Amino acid sequence: MKDRVEVRSLKDHVGEEVTLGGWCYNSRGSKNVKFLQLRDGSGTVQCVFGGNSAQNNAFERFDEITQETSLYVTGVVVKHPKKEGVYEIDARDFEIIQVAVDYPITPKEHGIDFLFDRRHLHLRSSRPHAIIRVRHRIIKAIRDYFDSHGFTLLDSPILTANAGEGTSTLFATDYFDLGKAFLAQTGQLYGEAGAMAFGKVYTFGPTFRAEKSKTRRHLTEFWMVEPEVAFMDLDGDMNLAEDFICYVVECILADCREDLATLERDIAKLESVRKPFPRVTYTEAVEILRRKGREFEWGDDFGAPDETMVSEDFDRPVIITHYPTVIKAFYMKRDPDNPKVVKAMDVIAPEGYGEIIGGSQREDDIDLLRERIEHEKLPMEVFEWYLDLRRYGSVPHAGFGMGLERMVAWLCGLEHIREAIPFPRTLARLTP
RNA sequence: UCCGCGAUAGCUCAACGGUGGAGCAUCCGGCUGUUAACCGGAGGGUUGUAGGUUCGAAUCCUACUCGCGGAGCCA
């Protein structure tokens, strides 16, 4: 292989002759000078071919370089004559690796469907490139946060036997002689087992929902991070979620300025994400909705428009707590002071991005938990192992789940969640 | 599952009952330290599918297929 220099490190090679390997992002030419935008994954640099400095007829051969043709370019790193802090290549020669004929994604506008049918190529374009880099930084921030706060990573299984919260929204597959297996919609129950073993754990992996949701907030496959902590109550859970979100936002603001600029993200909207987050109970949120003219029955669940209505008055995420027991999952702990509500919390992102976190203190009393399982008509036998966690040294504990793609969509200011993952899986898309 | 919208050139769209167009892309030519470059020319179409109304349908009607985003559900 040729000795290559990456575009990102050109500033360390000013004045030197270097060889770059990459793809033609765009090109322009004339009688006297030709320009090649070379993309190599680490960045893009302009290579300038002048008639005088080119070797091996490079200037005459220039037009062979079509969009996304792969090639090596050799030249001297120089400062851009007009742009401060930008470097370009005073090119001497190039060697084509493969000519790309009729690359389908042109530098002009395309429709959503056209681009996602070619997502494997679309990832080369600047916008998806920037988003996936921010996603990567968010993932690193998530891991750094929990790793440095005493959490142990606990990988939960993806194939599971138990339905968790009802079978209708699960993907099923045959599992040898054991009947159906389901793709996990959450790792939480396993996280609870982990919390009893390690004190503080987090699971982080793909989850699956077979919901026929066709909205800009839903994927059938998405990544979720779920911390679970022993000896923690709802207040501790909220403090953790708040501190965690602020850390992730700080990391993105510190390290992803360039990508956020590419995405034309309004940075000021992210800079106001500071502790403390406003906290309102479900009952107070219902009051807010009524004050705004919305007819709302206490006991109904919030829809996406309701969440937006509650959150729109705040410049940072808002935490809604103490939801009615009837609309929440069986494992959430009922409030001893008011059994009609559970010690649950949702974190609603600003700017209409909706619920990014859902969490709760868990029911740690085995009799109350059994009662809830029976009441929800869930199969008790598949939860026996889960009930063991309440039989052998049950302690108060709590946790939450954060949807990675919703976080990416919010921080990047995306219109649609499908942009937040390299290869989205939606109701109508399984390829590429 | 329900409600709404849509399908026209390779791409993004216009034409809304009377001979299917534009910009971009492609090809040819010109010009330029250019940068979603620009200027001129050329090629490019069974208007999603099937039926119906009409002298005449991309346009109106019906059914179907596919897609979109909203509800529900959720992260």
Image (cartoon, coloured by chain):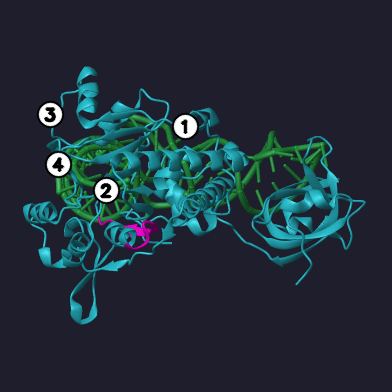
Chain colours: A cyan, B green
Q: Residues within 10 Å of mark 2 (few under 14, many from 20)?
A: few
The subunit letter for the residue under badge 1 reads: A
Question: Alpha carbon of mark 2 to alpha carbon of mark 4: how far?
Answer: 24 Å
Residue in the foreground of this view, choosing between A386 and B66: A386
Q: Which residues are magenta?
A: A197-210
What residue does disc 1 label?
Answer: A273
Q: Disc 1 on helix, strand or loop?
A: loop
What residue does disc 4 label?
Answer: A325
Instruction: Answer with mark 1 or mark 4, whichever residue precedes in sequence.
Output: 1
- Where residue A129 appears, as percent x and y from the top left, is 56, 50
Left or right: A102 with respect to A403? Answer: right
Question: Alpha carbon of mark 1 to alpha carbon of mark 3: how far?
Answer: 31 Å
Left or right: A117 with respect to B68? Answer: right
Question: Alpha carbon of mark 1 to alpha carbon of mark 2: how far?
Answer: 29 Å
Give the vertical position of A274 relative to A128 (above or below): above
Nearer mark to the viewer, of 2 and 4: 4
Q: Residue at x 25, y 57 (%)?
A: A210
Instruction: Answer with mark 2 or mark 4, whichever residue precedes in sequence.
Output: 2
Instruction: Answer with mark 1 or mark 3, whichever residue precedes in sequence.
Output: 1
Instruction: Answer with mark 1 or mark 2, whichever residue precedes in sequence.
Output: 2
Q: Residues within 10 Å of mark 1 (few under 14, many from 20)?
A: many
Mark 1 and mark 4 in contact? Answer it, CB < 8 Å. Answer: no
